[in-house]
Image (tube, grey):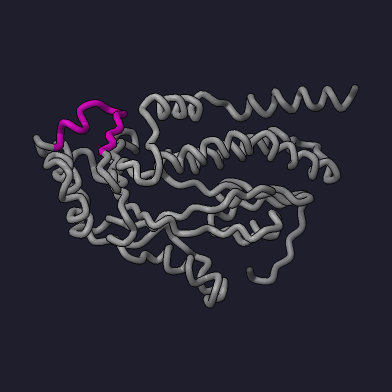
Amino acid sequence: MDGQTISGDVVIAADGVHSNTRNIIAGDDSQPFLTGKSCYRYVTPISEIRKDPVTAQFVESPGCCLEVLGGDRSVIFYPCANNTSLYTGAFLPMSEVGSTEEGRVHIQRHRTIPLSESFDIGWGQAANKEKLLNSFSSFPSHIRALLEKAPEDSVQAWNLLDCPEVKRWTRGRAVLLGDAAHPFLPYMGQGAAMAIEDAACISALLQEGTTATAIPRLLELFQNYRKERVDRIAEFTRRRGRNFSGAEGPYPSPEEIAQIVQYCNNHDEWDNTTSKFKEWSARQKL
């Protein structure tokens, strides 16, 4: 960005959904696009929720997640920060939220805005709490009461992006990681998890003493070990984001959701990679 030249044995491009290296490494023009849906998001101190008898019921059991589905919108609540805060994600048509900074820059940056003017892109922008409440006015009164606990000054809006499948993650000694390789929608909460698994896989493959000439083949193994799992979770995430009304296709059943959650959680990428790599290394010596 500033004209510096830095050399190394490998380039790991973990530069997010708006990756500047994706097209160089993938060799195509995979660009993120707006999905037509948005998300209001914020966190509320659980201590504030407990003060109201109407909403206290939602935080009686630590670690519980609540999701409420309605037609073309939904809202999810779950605890974070060691059960001291409650995260809220409220999904709805983008037309009701309007443009956010992320969506506006995304549309323009590939047309008119120089990269230097549009690189620092956040996850959204400050949003209007009243608009949030109006958009969910048809939801049950106790859910609306929980939404009303949103702090006045910290509600953000986030226009949701998807991306065509990136078929190639590596080129020579360069590799894409995380959202640069496989951008995720937020409906399963797996975007950061998949990036962490990517990092574990690369760490297991690029061990101390690895020669520069060996790196391209090891990066190909990285994609081979990771892509099927990532693609399966990403595709289910898209299904999870369908309208509950069924207008965009069947909404996943509770059994399907339970199965994919188990698939997401019951996995150790370090063990998976080291086991496969041990088998691969043994075959190379035959």
Tell me, yes or no, if residue 143 can be seen here. yes
Q: Report the residue at 79% width, 45% height from top.
A: 216
Q: Residue furthest right?
A: 286
20 left or right, relative to 119: right
Instruction: Give the image location of residue 215, x and y in percent.
Output: 79, 43
Q: Report the residue at 64% width, 56% height from top.
A: 22
Instruction: Give the image location of residue 146, x and y in percent.
Output: 18, 43
Look at the picture and state if 111 lies above or below 9.
below
Look at the picture and state if 105 lies above or below 57.
below
283 left or right, relative to 151: right
Tell me, yes or no, if residue 85 can be seen here. no
Q: Report the residue at 31% width, 62% height from top.
A: 95
Q: Which residues are magenta?
A: 55-68
Q: Report the residue at 53% width, 49% height from top.
A: 183
Number of numbered discs: 0
Magenta residue check for 66: yes
Look at the picture and state if 58 lies above or below 13.
above
Name the foreground residue: 240 vs 279.
Answer: 240
Instruction: Give the image location of residue 108, x and y in percent.
Output: 49, 72
Name the foreground residue: 248 vs 232.
Answer: 248
Name the foreground residue: 236 vs 39.
Answer: 236
31 left or right, relative to 42: right
Instruction: Give the image location of residue 228, x and y in percent.
Output: 62, 35
